[in-house]
Amino acid sequence: MKQHLKRGQLACGLALYGLLFFLGTGCAHVKTPTYHQELEYGIDSAQAGLWKEARFRFQNLVIKNPSDPIPHNNLAVALEALGLFEEAETEYVRALELDPNNAVTHENYERLKLILKEKVKN
């Protein structure tokens, strides 16, 4: 099961999963997505380049699961893709506070620091 987003891991295609999820819920009753459904939908959205939708999904997960580092990392990746570097940095720091040994988050955060360093130079 995919959980962590790694910046640069974009796949082509649509977020078909989300469409199937919503079609499967029916019109009369809308279910609240489970943690895993929301996580998968956020990842699928990110991979399809739908960064605002991915941000929305990961923000929901952070609100509902503030002590879970995975949504913090994934939200940071979405924020970074949207050019919101300072907000992304805050989320990477929080993810690393919750899981200091996570290699993917370390790699993502180090890359962001390089981007911020270049931004300051220019």
Image (cartoon, helix red, strand yellow):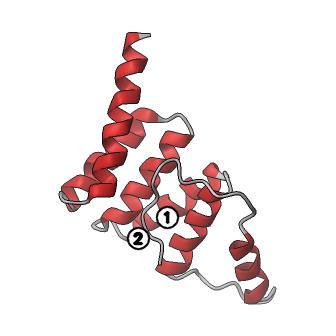
Q: Position of residue 38 (x, y in %)?
A: 54, 73
- How far apart in space, not on screen, are marks 1 and 2 (Cα)? 6 Å
Where is mark 1, residue-wise?
Answer: 60
Where is mark 2, residue-wise?
Answer: 64
Count numbered badges in the picture: 2
Q: Going 52% across and 49% down the picture, which residue do you hit? A: 78
Q: Decide: is 29 above or below 86.
A: below
Classify 10 Å Cα crowding around label 1: few (below 14), some (14-19), many (20 and above): some
Q: Going 76% across and 74% down the picture, which residue do you hit? A: 19
Classify 10 Å Cα crowding around label 2: few (below 14), some (14-19), many (20 and above): few
Check disc 2 and report its element: helix, strand or loop: helix
Q: Looking at the image, which is closer to me, 40 or 53? A: 40
Tag 2: amino acid:
Lys
Left or right: where 105 falls relative to 20: left
Left or right: where 17 falls relative to 64: right
Q: Which quadrant of the structure image shows residue 17? A: bottom right
The reply to whether dot 1 and dot 2 touch (C-beta < 8 Å) is: yes
Check disc 1 and report its element: helix, strand or loop: helix
Q: Going 33% across and 56% down the picture, which residue do you hit? A: 104
Q: Going 71% across and 57% down the picture, which residue do you hit? A: 12
